[in-house]
Amino acid sequence: MKPEYVPVSKLTPKSKSYKIKVAVKEKSPVKIPANKRRFQKLVFADDEGNEIRGTLFGDEIDHFKTVLEHQKEYIISDAPIKATDPRFVNKEGPYQIGFGGKIAIQPLVPDSGPVLPQYTPIADVPPTSNDDDRFDRLGVVVHMEEVRQKTSLNGFPFDVATLLPDQALIISVYGELATVDCQ
């Protein structure tokens, strides 16, 4: 008998007893804003392409660090669903998944092993890629500019560094990636 999974698009705050089959589509680096409360954003996608966001805070980040891995599939059941704060409504939808209550997370294929990159030569990357395309690249950075500050359209400052592995490609990295991970 095939298990019955609820599509992510059908979840609401009234959903109590359910199971969803999702993959971790995005897992952001841990952020530490000025208020010092650490958080990490996750985006889950089901087989139909429906997405739902989740945010880990404080100790939850450490607890779920090895439980939820990027691009791996999971069966999540009975997680609290709540309306997204209007200030943070996003393309993933009006609801977000919580990590409290009676949540149960089970890896779909526990012995699937690590997700290995599939490298693509720069010459093979099409110039008309859409926003959903992702390409794994491996390169050697031969020059890196100093980190500089820019201001977003909303007036918030952020750090940026430009990496120049060769004259055919310019890579700009932003925020914590520019200041911490590039040192």
Image (tube, rainbow, N blue to C red):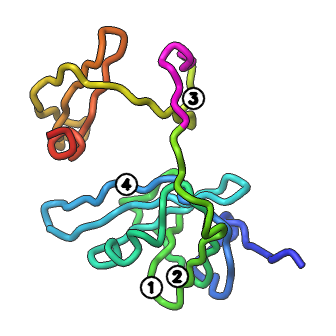
Classify 10 Å Cα crowding around label 3: few (below 14), some (14-19), many (20 and above). few
Question: Looking at the picture, which amino acid does disc 2 mark?
Answer: Pro
Residue underneath mark 4: 28
Callout 3 secondary element: loop
Please check the rendered image and state whether residue 126 is part of the magenta-colored stretch, yes or no: yes
Task: Specify which label sits upstream in the sequence, 3 or 2.
Answer: 2
Callout 4 secondary element: loop
Task: Specify which label sits upstream in the sequence, 3 or 4.
Answer: 4
Residue 1 makes an appearance in the image:
yes
Seen as rendered, the residue at the extreme top is 167
Label ID, residue 130: 3
Q: Nearer the viewer, mark 4 or mark 2?
A: 4
Report the residue at 49% width, 72% height from top. 83
Give percent across and percent down for residue 105: 56, 78
Quadrant placement of the N terminus: bottom right
Classify 10 Å Cα crowding around label 4: few (below 14), some (14-19), many (20 and above). few
Q: What are the residue bounds of the magenta stretch?
A: 118-127
Residue underneath mark 1: 100
Callout 2 secondary element: loop
Residue underneath mark 2: 80
The kind of secondary structure the magenta stretch mainly shows is loop
Spatial distance from mark 2 to mark 1, Cα to Cα?
7 Å
Residue 92 makes an appearance in the image:
no
Quadrant placement of the C terminus: top left
